[in-house]
Image: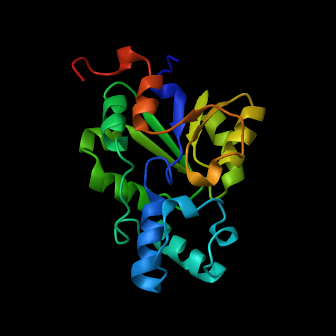
Amino acid sequence: MNIAAHEIGFDFDGVIADTAEAFIRIACSEYGYSGLTLEKITHFELENCLSIPREVVEQIFTDILTDSLATALQPMPGAVECLEQFTAFSDVTIITARPISRPVFDWLDRFFTGSTRENIRVVATGDHNDKVRYIHEHGLKYFIDDRAETCIQLAREAITPYVFTQPWNRDRHNLQTVADWNEIRALVTPSLIPSGE
């Protein structure tokens, strides 16, 4: 594929930010749920696959979503480098189901250079099922998300989705996938990547 960077959008949690790692770490260190691993998260709604009360799951995610820096949320491997390359030639659009965008902006300010940060736009929809209209509004033709149900919805709306492979979306779809940011980088038109990279 040769996709122009301005035509592809990205989910934030689970694609750009390693939210599962933050959840597992906080569940262990602050709530005593040891022995959790990424492979045990086999469902997007974690209470359906982990023996952790819903209220604890919700509290951990609330902490991550409202203050991503305080919870030490980290980038997915390769995400920062790739997005810095993409923004050298194009704006990049992040569309997240988070209800507020400020913690995402704060997080971007922490991990990205000023010039990169200026070329990243963030849309917070507050709803996993309300991304379609924003994707169309920003002229995106492609979108990468870790939630299989979102990608299935996008495919019905003339948007080409790529499912970012995670344990919770395996065997839940028959769509195209990307396993990591090396594969995402390979999708983008080479002319949009700085020479020598």
Which percent across, then down, holds residue 104?
A: 43, 57
Which percent across, then down, holds residue 155?
A: 73, 33
Q: Residue furthest top?
A: 191
In this picture, is 111 found above or below 192? below
In this picture, is 73 found above or below 189? below
| Residue drawn at x 43%, y 62% as measured from the top left | 21
Q: Is residue 64 left or right of residue 44?
A: left
Residue 102 visible in rendering: no
Quadrant of image for the C terminus:
top left
Which percent across, then down, holds residue 174?
A: 71, 35
In this picture, is 114 found above or below 58? above
| Residue drawn at x 24%, y 44% as measured from the top left | 113
| Residue drawn at x 72%, y 51% as measured from the top left | 129
Q: Quadrant of residue 158?
A: top right
Q: Is residue 89 left or right of residue 23?
A: left
The structure's colour scheme is rainbow
Q: Residue furthest left?
A: 196
In this picture, is 91 found above or below 123? above
| Residue drawn at x 45%, y 26% as measured from the top left | 5
Q: Is residue 32 left or right of residue 83?
A: right
Instruction: Count the marks.
Output: 0
Residue 79 visible in rendering: yes
Which percent across, then down, holds residue 151?
A: 67, 41
Q: Is residue 69 left or right of residue 64?
A: left
Q: Nearer the viewer, residue 97 or 72?
A: 72
